[in-house]
Amino acid sequence: YICAMPVFIYYFFFQAEDGIRDSPVTGVQTCALPICIMTNEHHSAYWCGKPAVNLDAAVLTKVTKKAKIAILGNVIAVNDPIRMAEEVAMLDCYSGGRIISGFVRGGAVETLQAGIDPTQNRERFEEAHDLIVKCWTEPGPFRYEGKHYQYRVVNPWVLPMQKPRSEEHTSELQSLVNLVCRLLLDKKKNNRS
């Protein structure tokens, strides 16, 4: 299901978005489902050959009009957090504020491939997360001297359209996960009957 789930969501929700029609009575676009498309990435994995989730998201910003785009997620423990902050902010601008950004730690193989000690993965993730949120919420330039990341100058110009709050992202992601699980269970039940 790891690789099949994004394909299912892509297909299912594209059909739903394509199915949005103007009501003949009110002229307002309506759809019974909250529309969201999720994409993910993994490195050095035979079961998912998508190494750049932000490329998928960039395409989705241009081929959809209303769908939320969930990125699950950027492997920030092994990437440059400043670049991740800028890329996700740019995607949010491209999409008109429709990005739901999820960050992940990545697996041991991804950590080893990046030349990083896997025992440092959790603390690198937490530090990168906090730095990304700082880039989105505090004006630059500022200096950053952390345990794993050091920058003499951080000066983020591209900011997301949405005002980030981790609680909002967490609840949006949980809602998305719950929706996907319900849809998959309903589909499974319908296939059995």
Image (spheres, helix red, strand yellow):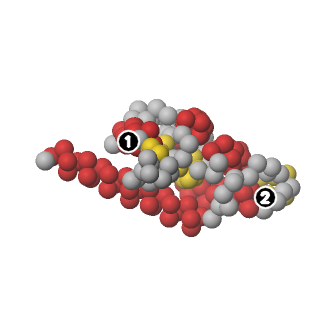
How many callouts does the rendering have? 2
* Residue annotated with mark 2: 145
Which residue was labeled with disc 1?
A: 12
- For the question of whether residue 112 can be seen, the reply is no
Judge left or right: residue 144 versus residue 53: right
2 and 1 marks in contact (CB < 8 Å): no
From the viewer's side, name the closer residue of 69 and 96: 96
Amino acid under label 1?
Phe
Residue drawn at x 74%, y 56% as measured from the top left: 135
Q: Nearer the viewer, residue 130 or 38?
A: 38
Q: Is residue 183 left or right of residue 23?
A: left
Residue 6 location (% of width, % of height) = 42, 41
Q: Residues within 10 Å of mark 2 (few under 14, many from 20)?
A: few
Q: Left or right of 184: which side holds 118?
A: right
**Is residue 107 shown above or below 138?**
above
**How far from the left and from the top, in percent, is residue 91?**
65, 44
Among numbered discs 2 and 1, the one appearing first in the sequence: 1
Query: Which label is found at residue 178?
Result: none
Residue 192, given in percent of the width and then of the height, sits at: 15, 46
Above or below for 156 versus 48:
below
SS state under label 2: strand
Residue at 66%, 42% (x, y): give it: 94
Query: Which image quadrant for residue 58?
Result: top right
Residue at image point 45% right, 61% down:
174
Q: Residue at x 59, y 40 (%)?
A: 61
Disc 2 marks a residue whose amino acid type is: Glu
In the image, taking residue 67 as reference, residue 129 lies left or right, namely: right
Is 101 or 59 nearer to us in this picture?
A: 59
Q: Secondary structure at mark 1?
A: helix
Please name which of the two marks, 2 or 1, marks the residue nearer to the observer: 1
Is residue 190 visible to the viewer in this orientation of the structure?
yes
Q: CA distance from mark 2 to mark 1?
A: 45 Å
